[in-house]
């Protein structure tokens, strides 16, 4: 029996799990599930990367200790993977004790080898990348990835003699042509390594949040040296028995192209130094754009893993990400494309075919699989195609060509659809012949369902149950003549998705930041204030029922959020041009604030851009009562994480900072 060890990168916890993280993780999950179905002993590892300057900074910003901060974020990753039905065997955190001691042990081994020395480092550091850049790599003096200022850092540092490994790495690449995949990346790295390798700084004194460097006092381990070690620490290394013995070397490290250098150059050099076998393959996949644009919070096209599943469902999301983007290349995520393909493939070709055949089996054979009679050329063609599916799909999956594997499966499913249309079983009166035709379709569905299981596990399990079958091993995935069972038609496999973008309840509202210039009591109403506000380009008057909750001086100077496109309304004789947002919990009312934002800045909620045109009070009420305010972005900055219903359920004291 073979073993198969697959990994994802461990994700930084300064971000919420999003569609980019989901993409790698789904790909790894499909491989893990495929190998389990082949009967391999599988170990599938994912987890979180929790040390380093970037996390330290994020924690400070959140007003938390790094440990409290990371502990607060990790559950979101675990939840996301549950929603996407990810079947990892272990979720590693770099703050796990076992991992920390493995990193220290690895440093000692590499040090004993003579590959670590103390020096001084001066360089331009981007904490976003957790990486030093050479002057020539900067773009207009800024980080080429984050386009942010880099910091000049000079400090004593331990170095890893990466330069020792240039020739050894090149020799390894040559001897193992599939080590870096796809092929074009291997070519790229060979060229880059040929240009020369500089020793790598692997300790920091300016960062406190990290694993103590086991040799020099006051140093912590550089976050990438720490992170890469997860792939062996998770297996119990330095204990060379147990899981390490069973599963190492990794069969596939899946990584995004931007971190391939660390995995294809630095990680193998670390392992060579420590005398540990190298992984079999590092597969660098491409990057996703969203509707043709780079995903970013300020563009409002940011898709969290949770949003993805909520909008399209687990299997439709899994299917589309792998179907539409050839693994290894960049690709686009577009809602219209997703809806089109999910409807055509999962709902129509697969789901509808199943439903039609089951109806006929229930009607004509009381739900029992009919016997296969004499085969005509028609059935023989289907049988041949069904039996060719295995090698096609397996070859594609062994090469991590997920889109090709899916293409083979759906080409076959379409062929079966055509067979049904051509043979018109609903018109056949000869029961024996009818049985043969229906059997052929049922058996084809059974085979296809086996191969779909790694991709769309929930849908495939439903299909198998309705067919009266189970999916346990790919050994069963060939066209048999003697399958028996009882079908049970139940729920639709894949509901048709709607192309129309669901109108977000906030979509009509134009929310803007306003500066409160002055607050006066309303002359005619003792519950109301009249506010003078500045909305960037103009000053306005706004009436608000806040007198029971605030003194005028408490409101003056605040940066609040208003609905700026409301039809002006007269409130007890004073015209109010807009309405402010406040949170109400148990009778405690608080206005929402956007402290650091400029007056007039648009506020994006749930990625929905500010609406245009005038709205009335009904629109505002509808939006507030039905929408969860999850993220508020002002001028590109994310301001708020989960709140609750605005004016209904908001956490007391929660402000928008
Ligand atoms: N912590 C490091 C990895 C250490 S591995 C020893 C890291 N983390 S990360 O949170 O930034 O995640 C990077 C991974 O997320 C990428 O390698 C890629 O798998 C995935 N993606 C993030 N954004 C992406 C897209 N827009 N598109 C596709 N995948 C991307 O780097």
Image: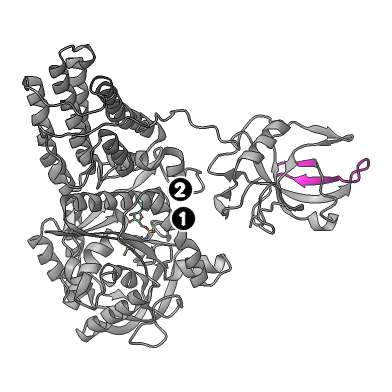
Residue 436 visible (yes or no): yes
Report the number of numbered marks: 2
Q: Report the residue marked by disc 2.
A: 306
> Quadrant location of residue 485?
top left
Q: Is residue 12 left or right of residue 465?
A: right
Q: Residue at x 28, y 20 (%)?
A: 363
In the rendered structure, which disc, 2 or 1, sits on the residue that comes first in sequence?
1
Residue at screen point 91% across, 45% down: 526
Q: Residue at coordinates 29% horizontally, 23% vertically from top-left?
A: 359
Q: Is residue 432 above or below residue 232?
A: above
Mark 2 falls on what kind of element?
A: helix
Residue occupying image coordinates x 36% and y 78% = 203
Camera-nearest residue between 486 and 330:
486
The image position of residue 481, as x and y in percent, is 10, 32
Residue 129, percent across and down?
39, 63
Q: CA distance from mark 2 to mark 1?
A: 9 Å
Q: Quadrant of ligand 1?
A: bottom left
Dot 1 surroundings within 10 Å: few (below 14), some, or many (20 or more)? some
Q: In the picture, which quadrant includes the N terminus? A: bottom left
Q: Is residue 25 above or below residue 401?
A: below
Residues 237 and 595: in front is 237
Disc 1 is placed on an element classified as: loop
Whether residues under marks 2 and 1 lie with C-beta atoms below 8 angstroms apart, the answer is yes
- Which numbered marker is on residue 644? none
Crowding at mark 2 (Cα within 10 Å: few <14, some 14-19, many 20+): many
* Location of the C terminus (image quadrant): bottom right
Start-end of magenta stretch? 522-541
Mark 1 lies on residue: 16
In front here: 92 or 241?
Answer: 241
In this view, the residue farthest toward the right is 523
Task: Give whichever of 88, 615 is nearer the camera.
Answer: 88
């Amino acid at each position: 029996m073979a073993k198969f060890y697959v990994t994802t990168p461990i994700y930084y916890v300064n971000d919420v799990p999003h569609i980019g993280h989901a993409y790698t993780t789904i790909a790894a999950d499909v491989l893990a599930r495929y190998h389990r179905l082949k009967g391999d002993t599988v170990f599938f590892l994912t987890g979180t990367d929790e040390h380093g300057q970037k996390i330290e900074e994020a924690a400070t910003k959140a007003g938390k200790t790094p440990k409290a901060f990371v502990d607060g974020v990790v559950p979101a990753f675990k939840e996301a993977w549950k929603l996407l039905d990810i079947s990892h065997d272990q979720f590693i955190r770099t703050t796990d004790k076992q991992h920390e001691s493995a990193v220290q042990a690895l440093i000692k081994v590499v040090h004993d080898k003579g590959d670590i020395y103390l020096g001084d480092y001066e360089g331009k550091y981007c904490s976003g990348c957790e990486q030093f850049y050479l002057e020539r790599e900067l773009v207009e003096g800024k980080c080429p990835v984050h386009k942010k200022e880099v910091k000049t850092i000079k400090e004593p540092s331990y170095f890893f003699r990466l330069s020792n490994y240039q020739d050894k790495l090149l020799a390894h690449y040559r001897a193992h042509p599939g080590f870096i995949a796809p092929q074009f990346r291997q070519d790229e790295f060979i060229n880059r390594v040929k240009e020369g390798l500089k020793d790598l700084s692997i300790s920091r004194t300016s960062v406190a949040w990290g694993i103590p460097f086991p040799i020099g006092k006051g140093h912590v381990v550089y976050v990438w040296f720490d992170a890469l070690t997860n792939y062996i620490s998770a297996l119990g290394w330095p204990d060379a028995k147990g899981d390490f013995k069973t599963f190492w070397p990794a069969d596939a490290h899946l990584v995004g192209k931007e971190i391939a250098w660390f995995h294809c150059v630095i990680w193998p050099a670390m392992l060579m130094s420590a005398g540990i076998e190298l992984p079999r393959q590092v597969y660098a996949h491409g990057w996703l754009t969203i509707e043709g644009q780079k995903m970013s919070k300020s563009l409002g096209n940011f898709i969290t893993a949770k949003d993805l599943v909520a909008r399209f469902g687990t299997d439709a999301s899994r299917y589309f990400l792998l179907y539409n983007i050839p693994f290894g290349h960049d690709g686009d995520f577009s809602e219209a494309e997703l809806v089109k393909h999910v409807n055509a493939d999962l709902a129509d070709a697969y789901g509808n075919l199943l439903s039609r055949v089951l109806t006929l089996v229930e009607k004509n054979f009381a739900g029992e699989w009919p016997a296969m009679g004499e085969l005509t050329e028609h059935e023989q063609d289907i049988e041949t195609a069904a039996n060719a599916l295995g090698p096609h799909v397996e070859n594609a999956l062994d090469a991590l060509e997920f889109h090709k594997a899916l293409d083979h499966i759906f080409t076959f499913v379409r062929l079966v659809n055509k067979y049904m249309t051509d043979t018109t079983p609903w018109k056949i009166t000869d029961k024996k012949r009818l049985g043969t035709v229906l059997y052929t379709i049922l058996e084809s569905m059974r085979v296809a369902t086996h191969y779909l299981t790694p991709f769309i596990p929930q849908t495939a399990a439903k299909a198998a149950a309705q067919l009266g079958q189970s999916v346990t091993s790919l050994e069963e995935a060939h066209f048999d003549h003697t399958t028996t069972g009882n079908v049970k038609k139940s729920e639709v496999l894949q509901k048709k998705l709607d192309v129309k973008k669901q109108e977000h309840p906030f979509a009509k509202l134009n929310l803007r930041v306003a500066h409160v210039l002055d607050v006066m009591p309303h002359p005619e109403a003792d519950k109301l204030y009249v506010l003078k506000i500045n909305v960037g380009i103009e000053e306005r008057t706004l009436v608000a029922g806040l007198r029971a909750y605030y003194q005028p001086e408490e409101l003056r100077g605040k940066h609040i959020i208003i609905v700026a496109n409301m039809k002006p309304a007269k409130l007890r004789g004073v015209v109010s041009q807009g309405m402010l947002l406040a949170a109400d919990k148990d009778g405690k009312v608080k206005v929402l604030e956007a402290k650091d934002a400029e007056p007039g800045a648009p506020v994006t909620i749930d990625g929905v851009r500010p609406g245009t045109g005038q709205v009335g009070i009904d629109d505002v009420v509808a939006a507030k009562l039905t929408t969860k305010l999850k993220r508020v972005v002002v001028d590109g900055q994310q301001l708020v994480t989960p709140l609750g219903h605005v004016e209904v359920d908001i956490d007391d004291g929660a402000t928008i900072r």
